[in-house]
Image (spheres, coloured by chain):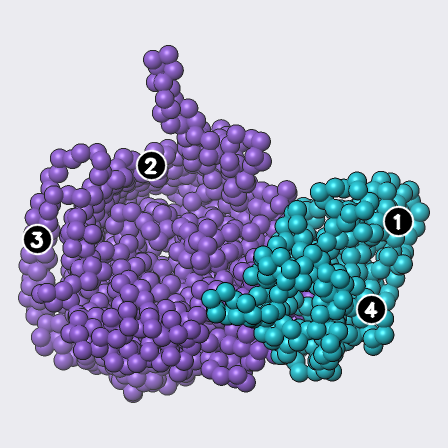
Chain colours: A purple, B cyan
Amino acid sequence: MKNKILYSILLFCMSLCLQGMAQTTVRGRVLDEDGKALRSVTVINVSTARQLVATDANGGFSVSVASGTTLLFKLVGYKEKRVSLAAGQTSLTVNLEPSSTEVDEVVVTRGYVKRPKETSTGASNIITAEDIRDIPGSLETLLQGKAPGLNIQVNTGAPGFRGTTQIRGLSTLSTVGSGNESILMPTSPLYVIDGVPLDADRASEMGLQQQGPGVSPLSMIPPEDIESIEILKDAQATSLYGSLAAYGVVIINTKRGNSEVPRINYVNNSFMRTPPKLRETLGGNLERRLKLEQIFGNALTQADIDRIQTTPHLSDSLNAYFNNSTNWQDLYFQTTYNHSHNLSVDGGNSILSYKANIGYYSETGIIRNTGFDRYSTNLRMDYSPDSKLRFTGQVFAQLGKINKGDGSGILQTGVAAGGLSSTLLPPPSFYSVSSEYISSISTNNENGVRLIRPYVEGSYQIIDGLRITSALSYEFVSSTEDTFSPAAANNQFSKVYSFAGRQTQLYSRSSLNYSKTFNESHNIFINLFNEVRNVTRQDFPIQQDRTPNDNFQGPLGYDGFFSRGGGLLDNFKNERALSFALSTSYDYKRKYILDLSYRMDGSSGNGFGNLYTKNPAIGLRWNAHNEEWIKDAAPWLSLGSIRGSWGINVMPNSTLERIYGRYDITGNYNQQQGVGIRFGQIPNPNLKPTTSMQYNFGLDIALFNNRIDFVYDTYYKKVDNLLFDQRLNSTVAFDVLASNDAAIANYGHELALNIRPLRPGGDFSWTFSINGALNKDILLKLPAHYGGQFIKWNVDNLNGQHNIFRVGTATMSNYLFINEGVYSRDEDVPIDPTSGLRYRNSDGTFFQAGDPIWKDMNGDYILDNRDMVRTGNNQPLITGGVQNTFSYKNIQFSIYASYTAKRTILNNALAERMGLMANPFGQGKDNKVVVPLDGYNMWLQPGDVAMYPYAYAYTRSGTIRPFRYDQTLWAENGSYFKINNMILAYNFNRGLLSRYGLERVRVYASLDNVVTFSTYSGPNPENVTSMGRDLSNGYPIPRTYNIGLNLSF
Amino acid sequence: MISYKKYNILGIAAGLCMSITSCSEMYNLPEDKDFISENLNYSDKILETRLGRTTVINRLNADNSTLPIKFEIINPRFGDGKAVTDFLQVFPTYEWIAEYDGKETSLQDIESKRRLVDKPIFEVDSGGRFIMHPSATAERITPRPVDTILKTQDIRFFDLKLTNSGGIRYIKDFQLIPWRELPYEPSSDINPYTGGVAPDPNAPNDPRKRAYILPNISNITGERTNVLLVNNNLKKDVVVYIRPFEGGNGNKLRFKFLNKDSLAINPVEFNETRWDQLVHGFNKEMTSQYVQYDVAYPIPLSSIRTDYAQGDRANVVFQYSRIGWGGVRTVSTFSLAFKIFRKGDWEIVFHFKNDNPKFDND
């Protein structure tokens, strides 16, 4: 690596010397067809692929180049023009023609082969490097709001972890985790990075309480190295990627060498991350006084008042131990200063080109003792001695180090609990500590993910139009975690947790493709390929409780008594997969296009009954702008296409356990060790794969030389044979049958509009893009014997936020008590006309003024579980984004925003906050901080018409539980409009730079997570789980202030 | 011509958009309708209510069906198929409109919190609860036979129709087998089958003996014997009769005390009794024969705890004191927790059967 840099620097110096010779200065003007001056036209030296200058307001330019150089003139909305300088030429006038066929240049990838976008029938979006630059952070965060139908929720601020990504709505009914922490089984799209598929969910399939490092594979890719990203949405586009692509495909291509003279590009980001506004608390004496006032104002008996005397932190205000005002949150949160560096060298010509990218990224978390460091390299070499033979070699190597503190990454339960400690308690010091604090700060947590992936590809053109290609890649990922909890953090006994995981993927693809044009009007393209994959995975955790002392961290010989965990985790995998695919495309003069494709996926993970899954697709397209009669009638139409497609993606549900069952060692029989099946789940070899069938209809329109660009898609996606665990009758020995009898439909509309309102060529340019997607999901069916409804009871009885599935309604709904406000006076509580009794709780406590009004659905004047109602939809209905880029001469200003609308979220953070008043006498762990509640519309005295029940009535917190989680009081509209980024950049004048041997200097300042506009009463409507629950123990999302520098020479 | 074509293209495009956005019906999606479970049921379909009082039975297991469900009693019949409508007759019955809290200061005050409405004697309410109203009297519905032999043709059957937007369910063959009215509690002196006098549990076949209602007594010394009076299985020194009397206005409750000769004891003798807080009654009238109040029936009006009632029974406590042996003042008490369901003029008589209470100082 080092040698390569040295070599590059050497080459670079040599090129400078070369440039010093035989220079002539050429002056000229660039004009449009009417002879008007064009400004901001980029002038490029073709041989070095360098941008030299841009034209001034009069269209004038001046360059110093060697004679005989070819110059390339480029401007958006105009055709490129190449001009070769004659020997001794010093002046030049260039006329640019408006371009009408710029779409030809846009290339998309289908089935690992590049195709013109004009002939593609599927729905896709392209995001270029320019859309995601200037912001430090993970790749997925940068894609938010940039493509319609790609719903990214940045719902954790944990460094190195990822939020959720969905393409075109909901594709699963499965949840992982339990209670408040349950999340949807992640259904991320398939990422194909430089031709190799990557399963982005592999780190998150264990839910929020995952084991191991949990680093998102997408956090390991430096965004600076990315050339383009393509998002494939409909089944025609994805079916060629087979069963892995059921949730959509995101194709990422990294940069490659394309400059004859080596270029060195350096990007630096120095950024500050600040925690969001933390919970307001009442400190010190305010806390004590509020608790005392609360007791005096609400005590029902003298005994309650007397209890103050036995509660030291209330009565003993002079005791130094209880006479503090500690800001606990401040002990856990911090503002951090971080930096990232990315250095790339590339060069080469059409025969040999190379690229090397080295990246370093370091981020310290806003929660102390967390952070993420990434080291990455990506080396690539392309060799093509003639037009027939092509050869590519590439090596990715990435090292990620993550520190999760004592949390599980996304969840920081210890920090959340510690932050709620009473402010009266003394801060951690030499003499006193809190175990939560010690646990968060002193837990020694080291995680590492090491990835290496070599990739080679060879290609040979046998006869004209027929090309054979073969690619091979092997990926090896090692994940380790070592956690040492000191004794003070863990009930006086130190603890060790260790995790070792290994994943490999051997991937090979061979393809044969043929393209041919007949009679200059009929084009056919055939692509036949197969893929072979062998994916293995095994994870071993081990946990030793009660290790000898803090100083002895290993190696540990151990008695099994205090050994917890250990052994192989059940995500063990050794899958062999074989796929065959055929894709054909026919078009007539690029006007009428027909795509047909078929793919078969076989996997050792499929059930015996369904060894091969079949993925067919068909697509049609009409390019109206290529019709002669439209060219005549509507010359302003740069592009007008209608697309339609249908396709199926089939995804296996089987795992070894679901097919074969799980076997345990079960006692002895006749001195023989017996092995018997575990009765939890009955083996189901006939488990069907989930079938995702999709229709898509699209419209592409570009007007006035592409100054207005409009893409519309509508789709209907039916996800059938969804995995659904059926509870079996108690007369059967087994508990659960993994069955296939559930289905969801998603349908919706996507719109993207791109406008360049100003005439190209001016000093001032403005690009405005807006996109939006409306997605509705409906549950189509459930196993027949449920009769159309299934309630997933939350086992966590206290929180009890249940989920309900009902056919014909939005899939992910909550099952809650309906809250209709607060009883203003005792008389407002309804009376049972028959018995004369007031509406009451199931334990017989009558409701009174200040209690919440819960709707009595079954009319028995008793509140119990039978009064719950299906309500809300925790999946967003509308998502999208807005991008604005202004540039004036060398200054560029961009503002990127995203939005989500119509989503129910449960504000559990507020529920917890209001519940803090439940027990003013609490001691030990129950001695909680108090928060100001003045800002909330809360009932305080009879006659108040309020939204929130009376929080200070601690005598009712045990019986009525006014702030119970399972009520719609916490169900709020999760719509938000977020300004993701604001970027101000300045490009230095090239003339000035060339004096210092620099090609380009760009400085910029950017903000990330700028501001979120929302009616939501909690901290952040985005920082919620995929089931729409605002966890108070989640990782808050920081705001980033960044200053960056991009140098090229 | 050219401009016309322009609009034509725009028109086609716009038309296509419109046609696509407006037809999500073509996806043939299932309707959003209520859930009504196949397992919707009642845990017990034999309803053995007592006539003459309010009975609420809630045995619905809705199996999380979407509420509200419309409940309808259909097909009422006797076991032999003969139609029956007596238990669905409409009569006035009380309905609470405000909460009775025991702090009302007049009968009008109490009556303003409830009103008479016309309701069927037996109904199913909007929540699926079966309610037998106190308007169900023996004259209107024949209770189960006196001879205790239950024949199918005497049993009232009915079916229940449950409807919500998810569909209709029928739950069939509910049986309504009412018990004979018992106008008060404790009712240990009434035979629940015949309504006549209950026999003595110690000698069930001796027609000369009968069962009694027994009050709680404490520390009452007999005048003649000078030993404490007792109430137990074998010896019953104080018994209670709850019986109607003539000559009231239909809202009276009277307490009377009889000595062993069945002569009235002057209530003033029970000198420690809090006569004003004895029952939730008004216009106290105290004579040498009795104490009488104007009250609202039923007693108690609801099952909440008030100054006059504990749990769901009214509680009356009578006390007197005297100087006992050694010059110590002793307090003697007798009390009764009771309910009276039927409106009328009732008297509660405490009969010191075997010996009079001793009021004199020792």
Frontmost of labels 4 and 2 is: 4
> Mark 3: which secondary structure?
helix
> Mark 4: which secondary structure?
loop
Pick whichever, B303 or B336, lies toward us.
Answer: B336
- Relative to residue B33, is residue A531 drawn left or right? left
| Chain under numbered label 1 | B
Whether B175 is drawn above or below A911: the answer is above
Give the residue number, with chain letter if any, for mark 4: B245
Same chain assignment for discs 3 and 1: no
Measure how far apart labels 3 and 2 are at the Cα level: 38 Å
Q: Quadrant of the C terminus of chain A?
A: bottom left
Q: Amino acid at mark 3?
A: Lys
Image label count: 4
Measure how far apart labels 4 and 2 are at the Cα level: 87 Å
- Relative to residue B35, is residue B163 drawn left or right? right
Give the residue number, with chain letter if any, for mark 3: A2
Give the residue number, with chain letter if any, for mark 2: A572
Measure how far apart labels 4 and 3 are at the Cα level: 115 Å
Query: Does label 1 or label 4 sit earlier along the sequence?
Result: 1
Task: Tell me the crowding category of disc 2: few under 14, some 14 to 19, or many 20 or more residues within 10 angstroms, Cα based.
Answer: some
Residue B269: image tag: none
Whether B231 is drawn above or below A301: the answer is above
Q: Position of residue A163 (x, y in %)?
A: 36, 59
Q: Position of residue A32 (x, y in %)?
A: 38, 80
Whether A100 is drawn above or below A729: the answer is below
Give the residue number, with chain letter if any, for mark 1: B77
Frontmost of labels 3 and 2 is: 2
Pick whichever, A908 or A376, lies toward us.
Answer: A908
Residue at (33% x, 51% y) in the render: A209
Measure how far apart labels 1 and 2 are at the Cα level: 65 Å
